[in-house]
Image: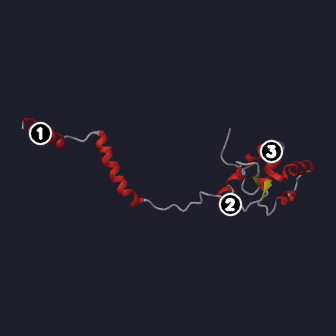
């Protein structure tokens, strides 16, 4: 009987004491779990852009969306030829790059060397804006 009374007193005192840090965060997490589905809004961003591999992550380069620095993987293309390609787009086909005004025969030979590694996808506004300068500085 004495143990029961002692246990009742200890439990009663614990009920009136301040919650521990762990209890506080458990209760807060539980409350957020219940409220989170109500507060979440759907973001309609295009996160699965199909042309991402052609922006520098594969052997092929998209001449309409890739940044000028991607061409550094192709010896002879960066910075001169790459700069001309990125500033004179968009292109309907890879062969359109040969029509760039001021392109020398040597530069055309360099483009011809890598023509099989170039693709012309539809220009995407979220990548076209950063073709020339993506904000990376040394």
Earlier residue among tags 1 and 3: 1
* Observer-nearest of 78 and 32: 32
The residue beneath circle 2 is 124
**Label 3 sits on residue:** 74
Residue 20 at what x, y percent from top left?
A: 27, 39
- The answer to whether the residue labelled 2 contacts the one labelled 1, judged by CB atoms less than 8 Å apart, is no
Q: Earlier in the sequence, mark 2 or mark 1?
A: 1
Give the distance between the C-alpha atoms of the residues marked 2 and 3, in whole angstroms.
23 Å
Image quadrant in which you'd find residue 11: top left
In this view, the mark in front (2 or 1): 1
Q: Secondary structure at mark 1?
A: helix
Instruction: Give the secondary structure at mark 2.
Output: loop
Q: Nearer the viewer, residue 11 or 71?
A: 11
Which residue is at the far left? 1
**Number of residues whose C-alpha sits closer than 10 Å to that of mark 3, classed few (under 14), some (14–19) or many (20 or more):** some
Q: Secondary structure at mark 3?
A: loop
84 vs 93: above or below:
above
The residue under label 1 is 9
Residue situated furthest front in the rendering: 1
Mark number, residue 25: none
Q: Residue at x 72, y 62 (%)?
A: 122
Q: Is residue 77 left or right of residue 3?
A: right
Position in image of residue 66 (x %, y %):
72, 52
In the displayed structure image, the side of residue 138 where residue 10 appears, left or right: left
- The alpha-carbon separation of the residues under discs 2 and 1 comes to 70 Å
Which quarter of the figure is the N terminus placed in? top left
Q: Report the residue at 79% width, 50% height from top.
A: 83
Residue found 35% across the figure and 56% down from its top = 34
Q: Which sits in the foreground, 98 or 114?
A: 114
- Which numbered mark, 1 or 3, is in the foreground of this view? 1
């Amino acid at each position: 009987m004495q143990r029961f009374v002692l246990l009742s007193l200890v439990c009663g005192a614990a009920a009136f004491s301040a919650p521990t840090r762990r209890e506080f965060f458990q209760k807060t997490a539980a409350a957020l779990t219940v409220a989170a589905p109500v507060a979440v809004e759907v973001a309609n961003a295009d996160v699965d852009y199909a042309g991402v591999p052609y922006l520098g992550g594969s052997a092929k380069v998209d001449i309409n969306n890739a940044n000028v620095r991607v061409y550094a993987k192709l010896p002879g293309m960066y910075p001169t030829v790459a700069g001309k390609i990125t500033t004179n787009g968009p292109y309907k086909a890879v062969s359109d790059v040969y029509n760039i005004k001021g392109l020398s025969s040597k530069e055309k030979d360099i483009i011809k060397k890598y023509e099989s590694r170039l693709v012309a996808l539809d220009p995407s506004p979220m990548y076209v804006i950063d073709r020339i300068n993506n904000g990376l500085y040394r």
